[in-house]
Amino acid sequence: EPEVTQTPSHQVTQMGQEVILRCVPISNHLYFYWYRQILGQKVEFLVSFYNNEISEKSEIFDDQFSVERPDGSNFTLKIRSTKLEDSAMYFCASSVSSTHGEQYFGPGTRLTVT
Amino acid sequence: GESVGLHLPTLSVQEGDNSIINCAYSNSASDYFIWYKQESGKGPQFIIDIRSNMDKRQGQRVTVLLNKTVKHLSLQIAATQPGDSAVYFCAENMGAAGNKLTFGGGTRVLVKP
């Protein structure tokens, strides 16, 4: 069964450093997402992406965040200058359709900012 | 602001019994709802979805009920098994182009043998 994969599973970084979280969506999916989950809290939407453009972003997704599909298989989330409050699980998801379509989630990357 | 919320943070259920997990939503524009299961250390896993033109949908051992009048969503799990122990989230989608999901706070289900 196809699945979304994410690397690394755990990333530790120092405050102010740049991190890139990587995702490989399901191969025939065209819509990609990033969500995050701070420990003990809700899963929160960050951004959706289609056709090499951001479709929607939340207020969390400020200028420190960016997304990219550098090739035909990877989808990345970059945080330029990490803050302590960026520590969270980051989930990538993908879907076939743009509305009312099941989003398949990856296993997540745990980001720890020290 | 509008949000999706859950009534019960933890639900303990005896193996073999039925489980009911509840969710309230406040955004009347939402027209698609999903239940996800999250096991420890894993990402959310799709369980079942329902569109706003329906009030009930059944899957394998799971049933989702939607009451648009009171903006309430529930997930029923029949004959709960140890493998059902997890955190369950409801999520809503307003059908906008970005396909954003808004998640509730989650309910932990603990299945007792």
Image (cartoon, coloured by chain):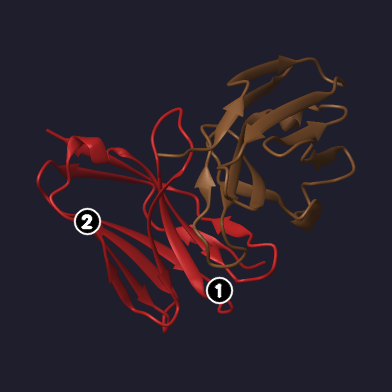
Q: x, y percentage for residue B34?
A: 44, 60
Give the class, few, some or many, for how many residues have Cα within 10 Å of label 2's Cα (few <14, many ≥20): few
Question: What color was chain A assigned in the picture?
Answer: brown
The amino acid type, in three-letter code, at marker 2 is Gln
Q: x, y percentage for residue B31?
A: 52, 75
* The N terminus of chain B sits in image quarter: bottom right
Q: Is residue A13 above or below residue B76?
A: above
Q: CA distance from mark 2 to mark 1?
A: 25 Å
Q: Who's red, chain-wise? A: B
> Of residues B61 and B74, which is closer to you in this image?
B61
Quadrant of res A1: top left
Q: Is residue A96 above or below residue A113?
A: below
Pointer 1 chain = B
Q: Are marks 2 and 1 on the same chain?
A: yes
The amino acid type, in three-letter code, at marker 1 is Ser
Q: Which residue is mark 2?
A: B60
